[in-house]
Image (tube, grey):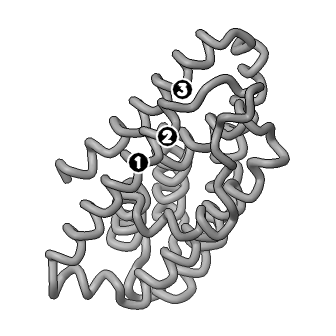
Amino acid sequence: MPFPVFTGFFIFTVVSAFTPGPNNIIALSSGVGFGFKRTLPHVWGVAVGFAIMTFLVGLGVGLIFERWPWVQQVLLVLATFYLVYLAWNLARSGSFHTGTVAEPLSFFQSVLIQWLNPKAWLAIITILSAFVPKDSFWISLSIVIAVDVVIAWLAVATWALFGVVIKRWLDRPKAVRIFNIVMAALLVLSLIPSFFH
């Protein structure tokens, strides 16, 4: 992978990974509700799941979307329903001290959720089409996957740590309720760009 191409890929990946999206908003909420250690399975699940997804799309899952575009639309609808369901549960959850908050996502759940994450699909399709040269496809794909694992882990971990930091300001049930509703709304809003690509 030529250095200018790598530089463009690196900038795109950092910006894409650290900006708000379903993974980061879930990590923030989980950091607030469960702390960093209990959020680590989600952090690892996102990093590994994104890498697996990038590899499989690079192998040819993307060709399925070219041949049968409706499959991508079905996945988008499923993703929307699932993330709205997560947002609904988040908005309804109570104080972090009452035990009414759902369990944090497991590693396996976080790996699987990547396939329903519109932001992940857009990022992977952009990366593969713009930053993986066809003449050095396998080497470039390997570099992309290795860098993606590190950046995805750092991004989601940063959002989880931010959740841990802001938890001290959420010691009143009303503050927790407002936080949960705002996070749920952001989770739903993070889906909007996927409908206009």
Looking at the image, is mark 3 or mark 1 earlier in the sequence?
1
The front one of 126 and 112 is 112
Q: Which residue is mark 1?
A: 85
Q: Residue at x 63, y 35 (%)?
A: 28
Q: Residue at x 64, y 55 (%)?
A: 105
Answer with the quarter of the image where residue 168 lies: top right
Residue 149 in the image: state x and y as whole percent.
65, 65
The front one of 44 and 184 is 184
Q: Secondary structure at mark 2?
A: helix
The front one of 23 and 132 is 23
Q: Which mark is residue 89?
A: 2
Please name the amino acid that badge 1 sits on. Tyr
Q: Residue furthest right?
A: 37
The front one of 159 and 54 is 159
Q: Secondary structure at mark 3?
A: helix
Residue 80 in the image: state x and y as whole percent.
31, 53
Q: Which residue is mark 3?
A: 180
Q: Are marks 2 and 1 in contact (CB under 8 Å)?
A: yes
Please name the amino acid that badge 2 sits on. Asn
Q: Label 1 crowding class (10 Å Cα cut-off): few <14, some 14-19, many 20+?
A: some
Q: Label 2 crowding class (10 Å Cα cut-off): few <14, some 14-19, many 20+?
A: some
Please name the amino acid that badge 3 sits on. Asn
Q: State the CA–CA distance, disc 2 to disc 3.
A: 9 Å
Looking at the image, is mark 2 or mark 3 earlier in the sequence?
2
Q: Secondary structure at mark 1?
A: helix
